[in-house]
Image (cartoon, rainbow, N blue to C red):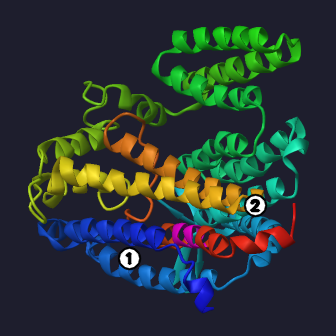
Amino acid sequence: MSSLSSKLDITTVVLWMLLVAAGLVAIYSTTHGAAAELYTSTPRQNFDRQVMWLGISLVAVIAVLMLPIRFFQLAAFPAYALTILLLLAALVFGREINGAKAWLAFGPVQFQVSEFAKVGTVLALAQLVGMRRPKTMGLSVGLSIVGIAMLPAVIILLQNDTGTALVFLGLIPIVLFWSGLGFDILLLMLAPAVAGYLSVVHLPSAVAFSLAFAALMWWRTRDKRVAGLAALFAGGTTAVASFAMAKLLQPYQLARVLSFTDPGAAEFRDNAGFHQLQSMAAIGSGGLAGKGFLEGTQTQGAYVPEQSTDFIFSVIGEEFGFVGAVLLLVFFLALLIRLLTLGARMKHPFGVMAAAGAAGIYLIHMFVNIGMATSMLPVIGIPLPFVSYGGSALLANSVLLAIVVSLHMRRDDFSIYGY
């Protein structure tokens, strides 16, 4: 045990502690400053609850660090299957919070199943890739990867939690890239994301991209099937997105999607764009060094909705300024780089994919959450890992990080299991 503890990656642990500490400071500011007087009793208790979940997460992390590599490999598919069953249970029997029927309750304790489904999905993807040698990677494996990530995404969409579903979809190109599949297959999988974004921002650009992408893939491969798939993936996404915005989405849903392009427009500023206008005002007012802890006017006036969860970044930006916001981003960037470094050291595909999957989950959350706070992306309700209030998210993200650290501690054991 002493030899294993000496292999514990202290850098990763410290970065985790710094991010959690930043979150506790920001959550405390929204629940114990002047803003606390403007809330009901529930938000005031967020800090205490987060501390409690941190204690639970710490116990879970220690337990995970004691588990051998073989446990994670054998438990990967069963854990994935269990989370799928729990997702279905939440869909049928779950409790609805903020419009999403994604919560299961056991007595006084309730948790968001989709957060733990991320852990099960990353393990399943790691095991799928880890069971195959690099030379056997092909289109069939790529489609299997897509299927494993798509299944929870579809169930979560049915739960009316679009933001979390997009995390699973965003994980697909990341896993495909790190699994060693060909560059052309990766481009095919990335095309729908680009086409979907352009469909929202500027439809003619999405159409032009679809045509250009199909031509590019034909030029690269000289294969009609690949060119046809390119046209289907990009053009199909454009068509579906356009149809959904025109025929399927309710007016308030469409406004929420479109408002990020100009939240200050007359039709958005008092409703769908209000969140982002207040968030940008808070971040902008922070200046270089911020207004000081518990001194942010937007934060303490409770002008920013959901400021302890989806818009926690605006609290840090206002009270700690550009310096605090950049420092937080540095912590995240360092953690992502560290995870990829740990994965590279493990060399075995299971460990590499687990590290890449964890980094991908954190990257997507960070990119979308900060994109929402700065009006670069629509408001879709995604928390900032380790920072935003939320016990389920803190526990699941901490366990996922601990799994990577545990695998790295025992990386010399990988060789006896092969592929």
Q: Is residue 311 visible?
A: no
| Residue 400 highlighted magenta (yes or no) | yes
Q: How many discs mark residues in the rendered view? A: 2
- SS label for mark 1: helix
- Left or right of residue 178, residue 23 in this image: left
The magenta region covers: 396-402
- Which quadrant holds residue 180? top right
Numbered disc 2: secondary structure? helix
Q: CA distance from mark 1 to mark 2?
A: 32 Å
- Quadrant position of residue 376: top left
Q: Position of residue 37 (x, y in %)?
A: 15, 70
What kind of residue is marked 2? Answer: Phe
The quadrant the C terminus occupies is: bottom right
Q: Quadrant of residue 403?
A: bottom right
Residue 73 relative to residue 195: left or right: right
The residue pinned by badge 2 equals 350
Q: Which residue is mark 1?
A: 50
The residue furthest bottom is 1
Q: Residue 40 colored magenta?
A: no
Q: Is residue 253 above or below residue 44?
A: above
Q: Residue at x 32, y 66 (%)?
A: 23
Q: Nearer the viewer, residue 39 or 128?
A: 128
